[in-house]
Every structure is written in C-alpha cells, then in structure tokens.
Image (spheres, helix red, strand yellow):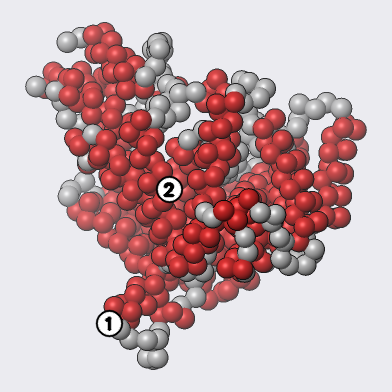
Amino acid sequence: MTLLSFAFLIFLTVVFILYWSVFRHSARSQNILLFLSSLLFYGLADWHFSFVLIFSILFNFYVARFITGNRTRGRLYLLLTGLTVNVMILGYFKYSGFFYDGWLHMMGIQGGGGKYNPLHIILPLGISFYTFQGIGYLVDVYNEQIEPCNGLLTFTTYMAYFPKMTAGPIEPANRFFEQIERRREFRYPVAVDGLRQILWGAFAKLVIADNCASVAAPILDNYHHLPASTLLIGAFFYLFQVYCDFSGYSNIAIGVSKLFGIQLMRNFASPFFSVNISEYWKKWNISLSSWMMKYVFYPLSFTLRRFGKPGLIISILITFLIIGLWHGADTTFILFGLLHGLYFIPVILYGKISKNVINRNSRSFPTAKDAIRMMGVFLLVMLTIILFGADSVSQGFYYLRDLFSFSVFTKPVFPGYNGYPKATMTLFFILVLMSVEWSQRNKRHEMQIDNIKNRKLRLGIYYAIVLSIMLCGSSVQIDFIYSQF
Amino acid sequence: MDKKDIREKVKAILISVLELDRLEMKEGMTAADVAGWDSLNHMVIISGIEREFNVRFKLRELNKLEDLNALIELIHQKQLAI
C-alpha cells in the first residue's frame, strides 16, 4: 500500500475520521489509534516483518531505560550493546548479501548454490529509517540530551508512525515526543496546509518523477548506443526523477501527518539552488544528512579536531561513505557517497561555506555568479546520480566515460515510445517546479499559499495541479524509489 | 580571565574562522544565529577555542550546550579549574 494508492486513500480517510471523533478525547487514545493503524499499515505490506519492527521498538525502549537507570560505566556498555544490536539487525537484512557476495568473489567461487544464501533475504519495509531512529534515540538518552520515553505507547507511536514508516523523514525523538505526549486538537488551517502539501507531492511524483522515468529509463538502459548529448539528457531527467520521487514522497508524508496534527521535519528545501555542496546537503534529504552529521560526523570530527582541516576531510569522507552505504548494499552507492564526500574537500579547504545564503534569499533573482555556482553544483550532483542509478560500477563508469565525448555536441535522440514530446512536456513541468521553488524558497513548503487571500486564485491553483495530474500524469506509476531503502 | 574577556575572544575566533565582517553577540545566541556556523566548521571553531584558552572539552559537555552563553560559561569553569 503506497501513499498514492486508492487503498491508502481509504485507509487514511477511515483513520482520520476515527482519530478526530472516537479517539480524540486524550493523547493516549489518539496514540493507540496511530499505533494500531501503523501496525495495520505495516502488516498489510508484509506481516512477517512486524516482528522485526516490534523487536526493534521493545529493544530500544528498554535499553534506553537501563541506560538512564545506570550511573556507572555500565551505561556505556549498554549503549554499545544497543548500537551493536541495531547495526547487526540492519546489517543482516540489508548487507549480508553484499558481503557474502564479496566473500564468494574473493574466494573465486561463482554463485552461491549453498543451502544458506543470504542474497535471498528480503529487506523489511522501512528498516533503515526506524533503525536509525532507534540508534539516534539511544545516543540522545546516553548523552542526556533527552529524557527517556516513559510510556511504551508513546515510543511505539514514534517508531512505527505510518506516514513516515516507509521512507522517513528520520524524525528526531524529542520533537516527536513533545507533540504526541499532549492531546492534539483539530486545526482547520493546519489540515488544509497538509492537503496542499499532499497535492504538491502528488504533482511532483506523478507528473514529474514518473514522466522523467519514462524518458530517462530507455536512455540509461541503452546508453552504449547513444550519443553523449542524449546521455546528458538521460542524467538530467534521472536526477529530477529521483528528486521529485523522494521530495514528492516527503511532502505527502509530511502533509498526511499534518492531518493528525503532527508536524514532521522538512526533508527537502530547494536543493538545486545551492551554491556549494555543503549547502546542497543541508537541503537534500535533510533528515538523513542531519542525522549523519549529528551521530557520525560530529563525534568523528571531535575526535580528529587536533588535525585541523585534514581531520575534517577524513571525517566527511567516512560520513559520506556511510551515507552511500545506507542507500543500499552496492558498490555503486558506496562510490556515490564517496564522490559526494570528495566534493566537500574544496569547500573545506577554500570555501566560505554558507556565508552568503541570507543575502541570496532576499533577492528576486540570483546574481550571475550565484547562478553559475548553482549550475556547477547541479552538474556535479548529476554526475553522481549516474552511479546512484547504475546497475553496476562498470555501467556507471562506462556511462560517465561516454558522456565526456565530442558527441555531446550532436543532436540528441530519444529512445523509447514518444520520447521527444514526453521529454518536452516534462521539461516544461520541471521549469514550473523550479519557478515555484524559487518563489517559495523562504516558505516552509512549495504550496504554502495561505498568504493568497483571493479564494478564486487559490482554487485556480488547485485545479491547475489536479488537471496536470489527470492529463499529464504518467500512465505507468512507479514505486517510490526510497521505499526500497 | 573574566567572562567579558572570554566573550570578546570567542567573538574574535568566530569572526576569523567564519570570515565575517562583523558579529553582534546577543543574549541567548546559538550557532544557528551566526551566518556560516554549521556542523562542518563547528569543530574548527571548538578547536580554535581550545587552543586560545588552553582547555580541553569533552564531547558530552559540548552536546549539552544550549547557546553561546553556555559555551562561555563552560570555558570560564574550565579556566577556573586549571
């Protein structure tokens, strides 16, 4: 049941009505409903994996309590045990196939063939997201940055909350606890704001991401027969596919959560208007990058601080290596992360990091210098997305090699059915998206239009988006990319 | 060294590391209020402060800091302990 399915619409409507009627009287009853509906949502995906989720919830909840109750050195061992078990669970489901495969390769054995073949392990839905929430919670409790959660129901709701279950955002515990420990009251403007955000997310996913996929996929699949100009177009559309797929999902998840009076953190903030890679990562998959910065980069750079900038570089490389690995057990993802880490080196060595952001946000248009830097960042990211989407490292490298050839100046060809008109239409919607993002860059999300007092104009915007989805939305709906992670 | 002097030296470190033209230190100011003070250069700032005041921080001490005043207080406490 994806967030854009008819089944989810029915599910959401029923939960919404129950939440604000029968279960509205106390925080406890609201949380009971959210917990039960989350369990149902998860169980419908694959009930077997509910046990992994329930184990993760119980384990992290009680370890955190033991950490708090222990004032001796034992609390450090409890934390380490907690972290190890979390990493082992994630490692078993997500990485055992990768390492087993690598081991077979090293031993010169072709294929598994044995009774136990970890390559057949199925990844439980959302495991990367809830495991990271569990780890963050344990570390925060250990560092006494948050009080441990007193109620198992509150903690369960935090871990299993269905809008963010499949693909995040990876929500910080303290922000979430504060909201669900008190009774939520229905606020009409918040619910409307949530619906607007859902609408924008659906537009990004159905009109842009899925159409981008139908342009990019034939190019990525047949890259060895195509000129560099086409490969460039393929990379461009694939980058927008990933962006609109994931940011679309995030907007829908955040919007759905607003219907229950719970504010999730923003996950994307117009990343393509970044003038350096550091700013880009503050705006792309914000919940993951801020998690990594807090729990990986920060302790690492603290340990290595006496080495100055080389220490920072080592810390950032390790952090991005883990970001790459988080995406999946594949060398392409590791290289994707590593490349982003390498992009940081000039910023660390020579950059002024983010000094000019405030000035830029107050201008109507970017300066020529900023525009060039934005395009530079976009191109750098576009190169990495090829590795992200490649089936193998060799495919990624061959694609990149073919991209840097003189055929980049030839007329592009569009493989696949209706390639050229589809690409033109999708490019138009990408321009619409970018214009809206630029004009709304200081808002909380792209569809925050409560400042438009003219009701007819607001309705016109809704109709335009709905019509775009109905008339131009892709006929082939593709699963959300990040729900695979 | 009193807190006022510590404050001025911290301000000078921030201006130098972040390459700012000027910095107005306000009550309750946090890293988020200072342009360019992010996780990437946070440890460069911390390392600069450690060198300037000849103190060593623990990670847990830094994790608990809520604002710039708390950092100045921590430096002051560490100096008194020397």
Comes first in the chain, label 1 or label 2 = 1
Q: Position of residue A194 (x, y in %)?
A: 71, 43
For the C terminus of chain B, which image quadrant? top left
Q: At 55% across and 42% down in the image, what residue appears?
A: A378
Relative height, residue A213 to residue A252 (above, below): below
In the drawing, does residue A289 fall left or right of residue A15?
left
In the displayed orientation, state which residue is furthest to the left: B82
Residue that carries the numbered disc 1 in the rendered image: A107
Is residue A271 visible in the rendered image? The answer is no
Measured in 3D between alpha carbons, the distance from the residue under mark 1 to the one under mark 2, in whole angstroms, is 31 Å
Q: Mark 2 belongs to which amino acid?
A: His
Q: Position of residue A16 (x, y in %)?
A: 72, 53
Is residue A432 visible in the rendered image? The answer is yes
Q: At 62% across and 60% down in the image, what residue appears?
A: A227
Q: Which of A292 and A68 is in front in this view?
A: A292
Residue that carries the numbered disc 2 in the rendered image: A340
Relative height, residue A332 to residue A357 (above, below): below
